[in-house]
Image (spheres, rainbow, N blue to C red):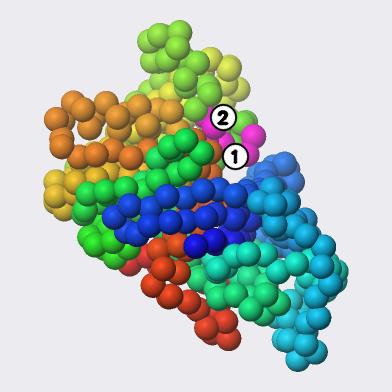
Amino acid sequence: MKILSVETSCDETAIAIVEAKGDERHADFKILGNALLSQIEIHREYGGVFPALAKREHAKNLVPILRAALEEAEMLHEDKQIIPNDTRTQIANTLARESRLEEQFFAFIDESEVPDIDAIAVTAGPGLEPALWVGVNFAKALSLAWDKPVVAVNHMEGHILSALATAKDETLEITNVRLPALALLISGGHTELVLMKDWLSYELLGQTRDDAVGEAYDKVARMLGLPYPGGPEISKLSEALRKHSETPDAPPLPRPMLHDKTCDFSFAGLKTAVRVLVQDKDLSEKEKAHIAHEFEETVGEVLWKKTERALTESGAQTLVLGGGVSANTHIRRTFTKEVIDTNSNVALCLPQAELTTDNAVMIALAGFYHARHEEYADIEDLVANGNLKLA
Ligand code: KG4
Ligand code: ZN
């Protein structure tokens, strides 16, 4: 089965074409095309993602990204298409608020062969709602033009499945996942512990009561005068300290909710503690590195302790990390070490580096399992939902 997937939930415009074979027990995914355009440079001057701008950029870039993905998959062929007038009207209505996108869309569709795909998967949420809508409407328009069904995908499910995938030759495979599987999802918008009890059936075990961990990284980075996105910048500073085996030298930061008996998190207090620490100070590069290091130690410890609690409570057999923050070297190292040290029998799955940040391949992986069972959306009812929940 060939899936074309669309991701526009945040600041990446991405389209992938993936050929999937198999079932829940064992599936192979061959990436035929994968095109992605990051808007990070554009948002950097705002110190974060600016939703109206993200939306405009997605609208501008979707057709060129589609072309690039199809071309890589060798599915881009010129061919005149005759789209019936009532379908044209429906497509125009779907893309109504994006006149430039509509123009580009028809210019492309009218001159291109319908690709050999079986379904279109699109991120329906969670994320920035205006950004999500562009992708959802684009997927609906493609569905109308090509007469292909649409699967609505939860972005967080994409993060979980891409972490379960291992690379083998030119393909990815998801095989023999031992359930229940516990997922720690850490991104700019999420900090959640989600249990996959049965295949693609979830229970929320814990979540942040205030800021997401990625948000804390970004805000602390800003306080230290580092550019957006802050996660990689903080990591760079503190890894350099570790590399030179310098003795940590920063006042200890609070470990929020470490001893509380739930699997919930809180990062607002930690952020405030850093603010108090840096306020009105002209910090040297060295002082900044020590604060970054202490911040990472705190985050690593809190994330692991809460995950350990959730592992014990749920009896999970597999532990998965997903979301942009799961690219973090210190967090990956901490989890790898703790899983070994605690002698736990759990299988730890870390996503491949290029699949940690938002991408469309992960949406295709998730889309496949739903498309297999023909869980297609009625495009009349399909909506973008910024707060879409897994459980
Ligand atoms: O999943 P993602 O790409 O987008 C959202 O859905 O939010 O996650 C973005 C977040 C940002 O907060 C960014 O600072 C953080 O992931 N991030 C990192 C690293 N790479 C990205 N945080 C810590 N260490 C990293 N290496
Ligand atoms: Zn994400």
**Could you tell me the amino acid type at mark 1?**
Pro
Residue contact at pointers 1 and 2, CB within 8 angstroms? yes
- Identify the element where label 2 is drawn: helix
Callout 2: few (<14), some (14-19), or many (20+) C-alpha neighbours within 10 Å? Answer: some
Within the image, what quadrant is residue 281 found in?
A: top right
- Which x, y percent locates residue 220? 51, 37
Examine the rendered structure and indicate whether residue 57 appears above or below residue 308.
Answer: below
Examine the rendered structure and indicate whether residue 217 appears above or below residue 372: above
Q: Does the magenta portion include 274?
A: no
Which residue is depicted at the point 60% across and 75% down?
A: 148
| Cα–Cα span, label 1 and label 2 | 7 Å
Q: Is residue 86 left or right of residue 364?
A: right
> Which residue carries the number 1 mark?
229
Q: What range is drawn magenta here?
A: 227-234
Q: Which residue is mark 2?
A: 233
Q: Is mark 1 within 8 Å of ligand 1?
A: yes
Q: Quadrant of residue 63?
A: bottom right
**Where residue 17 sits: x, y (%)?**
59, 55
Mark yes or no: residue 375 visible. yes
